[in-house]
Structures are given as C-alpha cells and as structure tokens.
C-alpha cells in the first residue's frame, strides 16, 4: 500500500513538473514573440464648441481631439518620437511645441479659421443684400445666388490609435473626420510605421524589392475581391468601386505580426458612400517581394 502511494506521489510530481515546464516554455515563447516596446503613452482628450459671436443661438464649430502620444521610450529619443507624432497628426507647424500645447494651438487655429470663414460669408451676404436694395423690382433673395443669413456649423474630430508596438516597430493610425455644413462627413485615415531602432519612418522602398508594385497590385485586387465577397472587378464596380484594375500601392500602410495593411481612403478607388477599405496582405503572400533583413521580413520570420 505504501509503495502504491509513493508511486502515485512520484507520478503526480512528474506530471506537475511537466505541466510547469510546458507552461513556462509557452509563456517564454509568447514573451519572445510578443516583445513589447518599452514605450509609455499618455492621452489628451479635449472637446470644444465655439459659437459665432459667443451666442449659443448662432452656428458653431465643434472639434473633438483624442491624442495618444508617447511620454517615455528606451529605444528612441523621446523628443524626436513626440515630434514625429505631433507632425503627422496636427501638421509640421505644431511639431516644435510640447504635446498638450500643440493640441491647444491646433484647436485655437481651427476656431480662428472658422471665424474667418464666417466673417467672409457674412460680408458676402451683406454685399448681396446691398445689391438687392439697388435693383428695383428684383428680389435676389429668391434666386439661387442668394446667401442665407446664417453660416454653417463645422465639425471635426481627430484621433490616433496604436496598431502595433512590438519588436522595435511602432505602427499607428490617424483618423480625421470633417464636416463643413454638408450632409455627410469626410473621413480619412493616415498610416505610419516607425522603426524605433533607426528612428526613421518605414517606407515601401525600405521593405520591398524593386518591381514589387505589379505583383502587389494583383494581391491588393484579390484582397478587395475577398473583402467584397465578389468574384471579379466588374462586381466590385457594381458595389461602388472604380479604377480597380489600375490600383497601385499607395504608401498608406501599417505593419503588424500578420502582414501589411493598406488603407484606401474614400474617393481613391471607391465612392464616398463606402467605408474606406483596409486590406491585410499576409506575409506568406509577399515573402518573395520582401527585402532581405528588412523590418517586414524580420516580422514575417517570427512565425
């Protein structure tokens, strides 16, 4: 009986050790594969509404900013990293400012531009009214050239999101939405990939061999067909796409551990009513196109 108990204890101990080893091995593999860059981020979120002449009965401009930005990094100079974020989200005229000041300056400039547009509109309206008073028997206010008394309301939202932050590669996307009085807003997406080891933005020429564009074109079309759940370009055109046969890599891409993601904004190859296509091309499909030792080939080799 004692021998049976001892054997059971030994077997249980061996199983526990095996499970522990397996678990530690899997965790170790995950850590190696998911080696996150040591970057800390902070967020500035501001929503501001400004009424013409400060009167809440008047039209207004509304701006919504949700800015994620780095506040520490052990791989890249923090000032350069922050400058890269600010420049590509708000514009080069703001990239010498600290992050929070850049946001406030951007909002202030947006309001100034709105006030200037409203002033120009008001002046043109006054001119039309004066002209209307000078012309006897004609009421311009009934014509298509007459400007309404009140200006339009403007809306803008701008935000960024961290898409991939591992192995010395930082991919982030900027989304911007604008409306200047129309029925619909215009949304745009801007993608950026940063090599934290070199401190430089990753470009298509950095990751692809010469002549990649023709082959990649066919892969992009195939991804569009799959996403649209159709069989040919003609069916894509029926959905609201155009010029698909001439589509080219547009430099608006992200990298992650699965592949390269291309974004085509509304109006590039699709009607404004459609959502902007975001197309993942897996690494296994583009391996022959990748430059040796490029960041993309290194990410592809992690699998």
Image: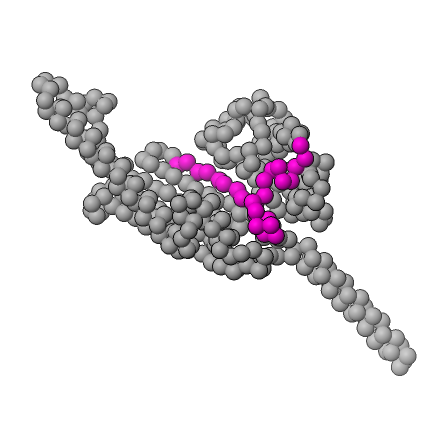
Reply above or below: 230 against 57.
Answer: above
Q: Position of residue 136 (x, y in %)?
A: 9, 18
Q: Is residue 189 magenta?
A: yes
Given residues 25 and 6, the one toward you in this image is 25
Q: Position of residue 177 (x, y in %)?
A: 41, 40
The quadrant holding residue 135 is top left
Task: Using the rendered image of the protein, determine whether residue 41 is visible from the camera's viewpoint.
Answer: no
Q: Residue at x 75, y 67 (%)?
A: 20
Q: Residue at x 56, y 45 (%)?
A: 201
Q: Which residues are drawn in magenta?
A: 185-210
Left or right of 8? Residue 146 is: left
Q: Is residue 261 magenta?
A: no
Task: Using the rendered image of the protein, determine whether residue 144 is visible from the camera's viewpoint.
Answer: yes
Left or right of 154? Residue 122 is: left
Reply above or below: 248 against 36.
Answer: above
Q: Residue at x 13, y 24 (%)?
A: 132
Q: Residue at x 73, y 60 (%)?
A: 26
The quadrant holding residue 154 is top left
Left or right of 275? Residue 138 is: left
Given residues 105 and 215, the one toward you in this image is 105
Reply above or below: 29 against 115.
Answer: below
Q: Position of residue 103 (x, y in %)?
A: 38, 51
Q: Position of residue 95 (x, y in %)?
A: 43, 49
Q: Residue furthest bottom?
A: 2
Task: Identify the image quadrant of the N terminus.
Answer: bottom right
């Amino acid at each position: 009986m004692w021998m049976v108990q001892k054997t059971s204890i030994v077997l249980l101990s061996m199983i526990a050790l095996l499970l522990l080893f397996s678990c530690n091995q899997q965790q170790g593999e995950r850590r190696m594969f998911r080696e996150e860059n040591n970057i800390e981020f902070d967020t500035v979120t501001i929503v501001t509404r400004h009424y013409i002449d400060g009167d809440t009965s008047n039209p207004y401009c509304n701006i919504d900013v949700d800015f994620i930005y780095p506040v520490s990094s052990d791989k890249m100079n923090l000032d350069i990293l922050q400058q890269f974020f600010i420049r590509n989200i708000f514009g080069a005229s703001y990239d010498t400012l600290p992050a929070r000041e850049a946001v406030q300056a951007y909002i202030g400039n947006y309001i100034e531009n709105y006030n200037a547009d409203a002033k120009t509109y008001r002046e043109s309206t006054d001119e039309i009214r004066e002209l209307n008073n000078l012309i006897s028997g004609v009421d311009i206010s009934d014509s298509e050239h007459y400007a309404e008394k009140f200006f339009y309301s403007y809306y803008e939202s701008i935000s960024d999101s961290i898409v991939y932050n591992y192995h010395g590669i930082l991919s982030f996307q900027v989304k911007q939405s604008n409306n200047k009085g129309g029925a619909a807003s215009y949304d745009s997406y801007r993608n950026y990939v940063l090599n934290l080891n070199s401190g430089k933005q990753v470009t298509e020429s950095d990751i692809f061999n010469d002549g990649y564009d023709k082959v990649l074109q066919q892969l992009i079309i195939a991804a569009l067909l799959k996403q649209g759940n159709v069989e040919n370009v003609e069916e894509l055109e029926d959905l609201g796409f155009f010029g698909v046969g001439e589509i080219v890599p547009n430099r608006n891409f992200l990298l992650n551990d699965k592949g390269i993601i291309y974004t085509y904004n509304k109006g590039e190859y699709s009607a404004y009513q459609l959502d902007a296509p975001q197309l993942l091309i897996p690494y296994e499909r583009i391996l022959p196109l990748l430059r040796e030792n490029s960041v993309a080939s290194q990410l592809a080799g992690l699998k």
